[in-house]
């Protein structure tokens, strides 16, 4: 199975159709469909980046002919706004975080 066929399968699994996927990405259907005919290597880099971002796959790996899912570690604890929580929940989060740190020392 070619990389383009794998990409098409992934797109259909995610969105149900190439048309819906293209719309969700802000691309034209013909732009996405052309990839399956001409090849990913002949596609505008901005288009490739949009597609990879939407599918959560690595652009570097795609350039090497492989589809590799990106690992998402969200939410990043450093970006969590604890001020959005009430005082009790803030205390719970901070206590849990401290317990995790303490367990690493054992």
Image (spheres, rainbow, N blue to C red):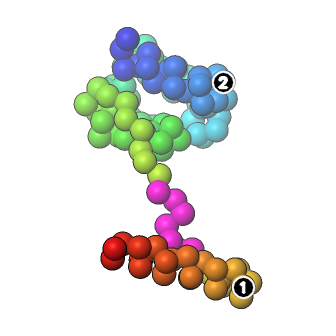
Q: Nearer the viewer, residue 95 or 85?
A: 95
Q: Residue at x 64, y 22 (%)?
A: 17
Place residue 14 in its image quadrant: top right
- Left or right: where 97 falls relative to 23: left
Q: Chief secondary structure of the magenta span?
A: loop
User: Is residue 74 magenta-colored?
Assistant: yes
Residue 85 locus on image (x, y percent): 70, 80
Above or below, 57 against 74 in this view is above
- Graded by Cα atoms within 10 Å as few (under 14), some (14 to 19) or many (20 or more), the crowding at tag 1 reads few
Residue under numbered circle 1 = 88
Mark whose residue sits in front, 2 or 1: 1
Q: Residue at x 49, y 77 (%)?
A: 99
Look at the image and tell me in which quarter the N terminus lies. top left
Locate residue 105, reporting x and y percent. Answer: 33, 76
Tell me residue 10's x, y (percent). Answer: 51, 26
User: Which segment is the magenta one?
Assistant: 73-80
Q: Pick out the residue farthest to the left.
A: 64
Q: Position of residue 36 (x, y in %)?
A: 45, 17
Q: Quadrant of the C terminus?
A: bottom left
Using the rendered image of the protein, determine whether residue 95 is visible from the camera's viewpoint: yes
């Amino acid at each position: 199975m070619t990389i383009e066929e794998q990409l098409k399968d992934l797109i259909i699994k995610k969105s149900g159709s190439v048309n819906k996927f293209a719309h969700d990405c802000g691309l034209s259907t013909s732009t996405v469909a052309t990839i399956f005919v001409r090849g990913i290597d002949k596609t505008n880099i901005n288009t490739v980046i949009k597609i990879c971002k939407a599918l959560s796959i690595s652009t570097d790996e795609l350039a090497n002919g492989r589809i590799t899912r990106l690992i998402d570690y969200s939410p990043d604890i450093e970006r969590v706004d604890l001020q959005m929580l009430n005082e009790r929940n803030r205390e719970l989060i901070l206590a849990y975080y401290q317990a995790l740190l303490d367990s690493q020392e054992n």
